């Protein structure tokens, strides 16, 4: 017979969002004395990804940053190089295994926190309780924080792009870009499969991370990613001898779907809660901002139901507009990003993507882009949001 286990807080999914929330709540003493159960199918014992993000202030996990780049560079499809004016922003990377080890070793010191390794089969909100089922047990709590992502049911007018990528960390004796330089978007590759670029990040004097990234509606075969990576390393980086040290593959949703944050006492966080920016796929910073809001609400009101999202209506409309422009394919993604990074300072673009700009600053950024496709797509985004019944 299934056993019913009661607690105060359930953390459903111990990935970036679930563990960040719990770590930050315990560090701040906000959940002291609460009985907490964390459920995940994985033991988080492998380096399954690297989180990169730009920032200008200290991050919540500053001590885990393994690489920080101060000089940011953009290459357009025609080969021109743009040294970005990043202002006070740096580009940073955290390895997930460092994050899991660091956070879990702290959380395991609390007797009030239990970790369960199991497959979650369902989460349900029922009145003022939440219920989580695994094959073995049923767990009941006052609040449940869910970070298990389920692909949304497509709506006919919605945009469902995928950011899909394969990255390799290589070791070479050939010359590589200087350690201080991150090539944030290098469009010197074919554009036949959608908006396609490389991230090129030096990790040591003889180590380089190269990631082949596409924004499109379907993924490629592994062989296609591998062929393009080899071609880029040979023809653009002029590296002829190297050893592959690590591989990374991933898919991040880029959609204008409106994710539900609250469902009774279930709070969705991370990608499952809509913390992935639809226009960029970046999730780390946005999730940390959401967690900040949840914790402030707990401190001030004793519950997690914060009122104002970081990605508000304005940002949602901008994101939907960009996805529609890409879908129309008249203004090609590589041209759009070239226009943007050549004409607007990068620090302003980062602030814009973080939702920290005024309408006037937004207009200044938009002036760098072709007006007609954006105006048409903005009208579509408005119509889909406010007029269309679907
Ligand atoms: C390879 C890769 C690289 C990325 N790089 C970046 C980046 O550089 N910058 C950035 O901002 N974003 C990046 N992202 C996007 C995003 O930051 C990550 O996906 C991030 O891990 C999302 O956090 P999360 O907590 O929402 O999901 P996850 O970290 O995936 O956590 C979800 C957890 O739920 C568990 N789980 C899932 N289903 C079940 C189930 N049925 N039962 C039990 N457990 C379950 C999983 O094991 C996992 O631990 C990347 C994504 C990928 C895939």
Image (cartoon, rainbow, N blue to C red):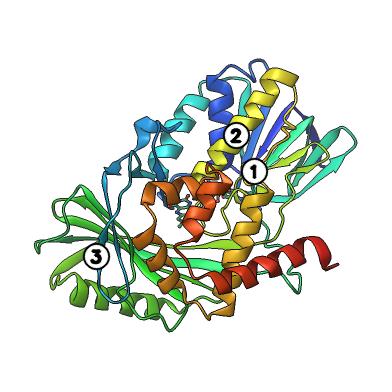
The residue mark sitting in front, 2 or 3, is 3
Q: Residue at x 58, y 16 (%)?
A: 29
The residue mark sitting in front, 3 or 1, is 3
- Disc 1, disc 2: CB below 8 Å? yes
Marker disc for residue 290? none
Where residue 233 sits, quadrant-wise, is: bottom left
- Asked whether mark 1 and ligand 1 are closer than 8 Å, the reply comes as yes
SS of the residue under disc 1: loop
Q: Residue at x 54, y 69 (%)?
A: 371
Q: Residue tagged by mark 3?
A: 81
In primary-sequence order, the first of circles 1 and 2 is 1
Residue nearest the observer in this picture, 316 or 292: 316
Q: Residue furthest right?
A: 127
Q: Residue tagged by mark 2?
A: 291
The image shows residue 146 at horizontal and vertical percentages of: 68, 43
Q: Is residue 15 visible?
A: no
Residue 119 as seen in the image, left or right of residue 174: right
Say few, some or many: other residues with alpha carbon within 10 Å of mark 1 (under 14 / 14 to 19 / 20 or more).
many
The image shows residue 254 at horizontal and vertical percentages of: 58, 62
- Quadrant assignment for the C terminus: bottom right
Q: CA distance from mark 2 to mark 3?
A: 37 Å
Q: Residue at x 55, y 19 (%)?
A: 28
Q: Against 108, is 371 above or below?
A: below
Q: Residue tagged by mark 1?
A: 269
Residue 5 as seen in the image, left or right of residue 118: right
Say few, some or many: other residues with alpha carbon within 10 Å of mark 2 (under 14 / 14 to 19 / 20 or more).
many
């Amino acid at each position: 017979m299934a056993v019913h286990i009661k607690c105060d807080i359930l953390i459903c999914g111990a990935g970036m969002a679930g563990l960040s929330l719990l770590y930050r709540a315990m560090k701040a003493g906000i959940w002291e004395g609460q009985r907490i159960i964390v459920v995940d199918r994985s033991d988080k014992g492998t380096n399954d990804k690297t989180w990169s993000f730009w920032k200008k202030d200290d991050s919540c996990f500053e001590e885990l940053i393994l690489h920080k780049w101060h000089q940011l560079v953009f290459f357009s499809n025609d080969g021109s190089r743009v040294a970005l004016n990043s202002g006070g922003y740096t580009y940073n990377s955290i390895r997930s295994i460092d994050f899991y080890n660091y956070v879990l070793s702290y959380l395991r010191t609390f007797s009030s926190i239990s970790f369960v390794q199991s497959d979650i089969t369902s989460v349900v909100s029922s009145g003022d309780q939440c219920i989580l089922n695994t094959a073995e047990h049923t767990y009941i709590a006052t609040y449940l924080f869910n970070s298990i992502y389920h692909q949304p049911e497509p709506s006919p007018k919605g945009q469902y792009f995928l950011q899909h990528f394969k990255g390799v960390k290589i070791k070479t004796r050939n010359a590589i870009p200087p350690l201080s330089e991150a090539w944030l978007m290098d469009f010197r590759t074919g554009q036949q499969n959608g908006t396609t670029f490389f991230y090129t990040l030096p990790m040591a004097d003889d180590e380089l991370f190269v990631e082949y990234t596409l924004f499109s509606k379907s993924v490629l075969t592994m062989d296609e990613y591998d062929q393009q990576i080899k071609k880029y390393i040979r023809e653009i980086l002029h590296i002829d001898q190297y050893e592959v040290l690590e591989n990374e593959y991933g898919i991040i949703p880029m959609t204008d779907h409106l994710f539900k944050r609250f469902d009774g006492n279930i709070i969705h966080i991370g990608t499952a809660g809509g913390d992935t920016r639809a226009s960029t796929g970046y999730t780390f910073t946005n999730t940390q901002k959401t967690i900040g809001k949840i914790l402030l609400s707990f401190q001030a009101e004793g519950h997690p139901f914060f009122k104002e999202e970081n990605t508000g209506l304005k940002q949602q409309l901008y994101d939907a507009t960009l996805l529609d422009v890409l879908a129309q394919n008249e203004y090609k993604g590589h041209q759009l990003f070239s226009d943007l990074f050549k004409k607007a300072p990068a620090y302003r673009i980062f602030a814009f993507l973080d939702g920290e700009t005024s309408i006037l600053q937004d207009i200044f950024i938009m002036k760098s882009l072709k007006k007609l496709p954006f105006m048409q797509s903005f009208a579509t985004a408005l119509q889909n949001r406010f007029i269309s019944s679907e």
